[in-house]
Image: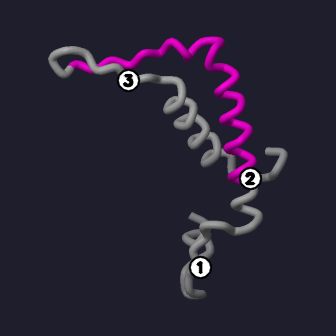
Amino acid sequence: KHFKLDILIPMTISFYGVMLLTINPVKLAFDKKVAEISYMDGKGLLVGIAVAIITVEVYRIFKEKKIGVIKMPPSVPPSLTET
């Protein structure tokens, strides 16, 4: 909110980033899989905070410098251009 950005996209990216870094999938015998969640407590809290801060900063820089923006023709409505 401080940077006046849409909060849904960075929040979603942060959530999935933390999940990718803290959950360790373990393959068991007979093709059964389980997720080891030993870093979902206080040990993973620092990782979560770091990922959230880095994600918001990278997203803000991309939005300011218009990195990854696809230019549409003028006939396309502005609401579709934002998405």
Residue 62, given in percent of the width and then of the height, sits at 69, 60
Q: Residue at x 47, y 23 (%)?
A: 23
Question: In what element is the residue under mark 3?
Answer: strand
Q: Is residue 25 above or below residue 6?
A: above
Q: Mark 1 or 2 closer to N-term?
A: 2
Q: Residue at x 57, y 31 (%)?
A: 18
Crowding at dot 2, Cα within 10 Å, few <14 / some 14-19 / many 20+, comes out as few
Residue marked by disc 3: 25
Label 3 crowd bin: few (<14), some (14–19), many (20+), radius 10 Å:
few
Percent across and percent down for residue 5 are: 74, 53
Tag 2 residue = 5
Q: Earlier in the sequence, mark 3 or mark 1?
A: 3
Q: Which residues are magenta?
A: 32-60
Query: How many numbered circles are shown?
Result: 3
Residue type highlighted by circle 1: Lys
In the drawing, does residue 12 fall left or right of residue 61? left
In-image side of 49 versus 34 (left or right):
right
Taking 56 as reference, is 67 above or below it?
below
Quarter of the image with the C terminus is bottom right
Residue ID at (60%, 87%): 74
Which residue was labeled with disc 1?
71
- Res 30 → quadrant: top left
Answer whether labels 1 and 2 touch (C-beta < 8 Å). no
Residue 11 lies, in percent from the top left, at 63, 40
- Distance from Cα at disc 1 to Cα at disc 2: 20 Å
**Residue sitting at x 53%, y 24%:** 22
**Whether residue 8 is situated above or below residue 69 in the rendered picture:** above
The front one of 3 and 59 is 59
Callout 2 amino acid:
Leu
Which residue reaches farthest bottom?
74
Q: Is residue 34 magenta?
A: yes
